[in-house]
Image: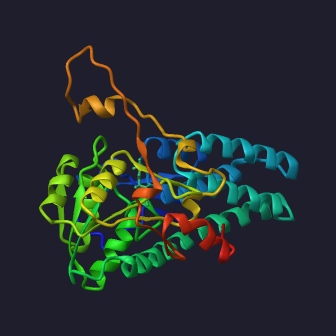
Amino acid sequence: MSLQTQVYPILWQTDRVSLIDQTRLPNEYALVEVTRSDDMAHAIKTMIVRGAPAIGVAAAYGMYLGAREIQTGDRDFFLAELEAIAQKLRATRPTAVNLFWAIEQMLKTARQTLGSVDYLKQTLLETAKRINAEDIATCQAIGAHGLSALPKEPDKLRLLTHCNAGALATAGYGTALGVVRSTWNAGRLERVYADETRPRLQGAKLTAWECVQEGIPVTVITDNMAAHCMQRGLIDAVVVGADRIAANGDTANKIGTYSVALIAKAHGIPFFVAAPLSTIDFNISDGTQIPIEERDPMEVYQIGETLLCPPGVEYYNPAFDVTPASLITAIVTEHGAFAPSQLQSKLHEQKLS
Ligand code: MRU
């Protein structure tokens, strides 16, 4: 398998979407071609494409693919059918708000665009492409702001990350891993520690793969090694992504993030959340209102074909947890890094909330 220096998990190709099949990495680099909205919903649900901003971009294309299947010249009928497609895509995964945000952008475009149904369809494709392109630019801005927010000492930083908030989890470049990339490109990164991230191993499989593609020094640790690494002085800062941030800064991210935040606090290590504005849900005041996805228990009791537990046990598989704002040093957005308590007022000042 050749090195992929620029990783784009979602690419529009003339009349279809190419997705990197993230369920096969790192052993196999395979593309899945998607031409129908049903197939896009399936790809999101089964995590062929995953990561909050990436599923937003994928859903935007899913809306267009669904729109072009609607055979009508009647605008009202078209809009009603489009809402049904939106509902199908919304039902794929509940936690990452970017999914709902992108679908809403597409619906808004359809409602506000005048002209024939054919023209509406064309405008929907352009909107999906714009959401895609803007996400890459947003991640690059997050990377730059994250670099400025990181500790000034030591000169070369050892960063810990959890899950995969990289190019694979966005349209390209990444949020938390975007900060890692910027730090590496600025010559300020010693190494990144990647939690393996049970149960689906996004850290071991995907973050490690991305780092290897670019020659970024990466050490994979099992999730239960992070406290030990901090105690031994191996970590200067933690940077993670987010699936949904409440107005008060409480942050849902991959299961295990909360434990990392707690142990970082115990060791006086700064803990950064890197995420675009589209991940902030100003409609909810705190993290208790964030819906937490529960996935198939087989993700817990099985690795590959190997069963881990004896028959007769019960399983619990929440895919995300909520880190309270009090444990977060700053939330790094494309508009700057803000303390969680300042998030709403700072973004409001910039008329963005
Ligand atoms: O279940 P996943 O793999 O979609 O979860 C991904 C995460 O939790 C990421 O950290 C988050 O979506 C941020 S991606 C930039």
Residue occupying the point 46% across, 74% down: 142
Residue reaching furthest to the left: 232
Quadrant in the picture for the N terminus: bottom left
* Residue 28 seen in the figure: no
Q: Position of residue 41 (x, y in %)?
A: 55, 44
Quadrant in the picture for the C terminus: bottom right
Q: Quadrant of residue 61?
A: bottom right
Query: Which of the pair 246/168 is nearer the observer?
Result: 246
Query: Which of the pair 279/43 is nearer the observer?
Result: 279
Q: Position of residue 238 (x, y in %)?
A: 31, 64
Position of 67 relative to 155 (above/below) = above
Q: Position of residue 187 (x, y in %)?
A: 24, 85
Left or right of 254 on screen, residue 161: left
Left or right of 154 on screen, residue 255: right
Left or right of 114 on screen, residue 236: left
Query: Which of the pair 257/129 is nearer the observer?
Result: 257
Q: Position of residue 343 (x, y in %)?
A: 56, 67
Q: Quadrant of residue 241?
A: bottom left
Query: Which of the pair 83/289 is nearer the observer?
Result: 289
Give the colour scheme shown. Answer: rainbow
Residue occupying the point 67% across, 46% down: 86
Residue occupying the point 58% across, 62% down: 278
Q: Quadrant of residue 242?
A: bottom left
